[in-house]
Image: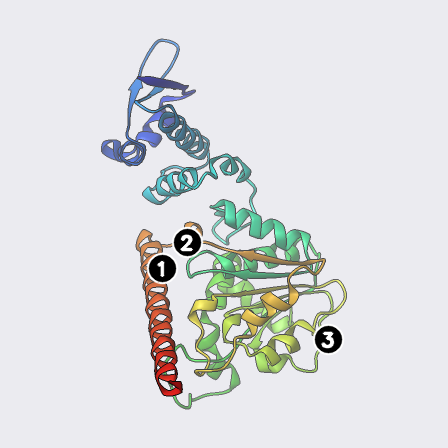
Amino acid sequence: MNRKIIKMEHSDATAKIFGNFDCNVRMIEDAFAVSIRNRESESGDSIVIEGEQETAVASAAQCIDYLHGLSVKTDVLTEQSVQYAIDMVRAGEGTSLAELGDECICLTVRGKPIKAKTVGQKQYVDSIRKNTVVLGVGPAGTGKTFLAVAMAVRALREKQINRIILTRPAIEAGEKLGFLPGDLQSKIDPYLRPLYDALYEMMGTENYQKLVEKGTIEIAPLAYMRGRTLDDSFIILDEAQNATPEQMKMFLTRLGFNSKAVVTGDITQTDLPRGQKSGLSSAVKILSGIEDIGIHYFSDRDVVRHRLVQKIILAYEKYDRELLKKESEHRAAQKFRVERKNEKTNK
């Protein structure tokens, strides 16, 4: 029997790691086929991990170490945090959990710190800090837009830039809403609502409105970017999978001096007409390898919404793979039949 003992500084940390009715450690036990128990002594608490396989015990210990560090920064360890630790260790990336750290990107209007919750998010934030242009590509719920807005707000507060410009293509998600009433702002509001929500949370409604009136914050459809040169700005193009290659080129060439641009999108959720190529997809291929342009790919492990979102994404990916496999087999069978027919004709 292999054993590893992890000492705890405080009993509060032990309680957080174990969770309500030991639900957190039960997940780790089931994932790695180990047993985990708390051992109390005069010198303090210890978490004892035992298992038949040394690698399984070591993997469980990696999860506990990560949760131990996280317990200092948060009041409650969620099921999502535990599952993330398990998934990272299973993927052989447990050592990278130490990269997360405790950096606060910015504070919300209620004083809540905004931080990277996954290694993928941390790498994305680092890429935005390091590069002038960043393409963030990945599934829904990975924080692509939210973190980009947080970085923009931080840059504005630190006076690194003078303006925040947020834009996205005005394309309905599979529904035709028809003509919308009101002025231009009323017409584009439904398309830009996710961007408003992020800014309201970080700045508050009143402060946001003041900055909009001063022109410090601008939110507009992608079509209104043509012909402009954007200096001293932090520019975010959201839902970029719905931009055409021509629109993408137009947007990227708006970049002026002392500006940053972040492009976010999910290539698997394009709402462009059938047969129309996504500008985000082409940009990833064209711009790969260019200095000062970062391309960051999120995975399903970076999903920070409800735990079911991750399962939904994985289910759709599995379905798409099976569909592609069937289509490939069907084309191969058709090709074989045509070749056989040609052979018989030639004879």
Q: Tell which residue pokes out farthest to the front in this image.
A: 347
Marks 2 and 3, Cα distance to the nearest angstrom?
36 Å
Marks 1 and 2, Cα distance to the nearest angstrom?
7 Å
| Residue at 35% across, 66% down | 325
Q: Mark on residue 229?
A: 3
- As helix, strand or loop, the secondary structure at mark 1 comes to helix
Nearer-N-terminus badge (2/3): 3
Residue named by callout 2: 300
Looking at the image, residue 225 sits to the left or right of residue 38; the answer is right
Front residue of 199 and 271: 271
Amino acid at dot 1:
Ile
Relative to residue 37, is residue 152 depicted above or below?
A: below
Residue named by callout 1: 313
Residue 52, horizontal then vertical, whole percent = 30, 22
Q: Are marks 1 and 2 in contact (CB under 8 Å)?
A: yes
- As helix, strand or loop, the secondary structure at mark 2 comes to helix
Residue 146, horizontal then vertical, whole percent = 50, 59
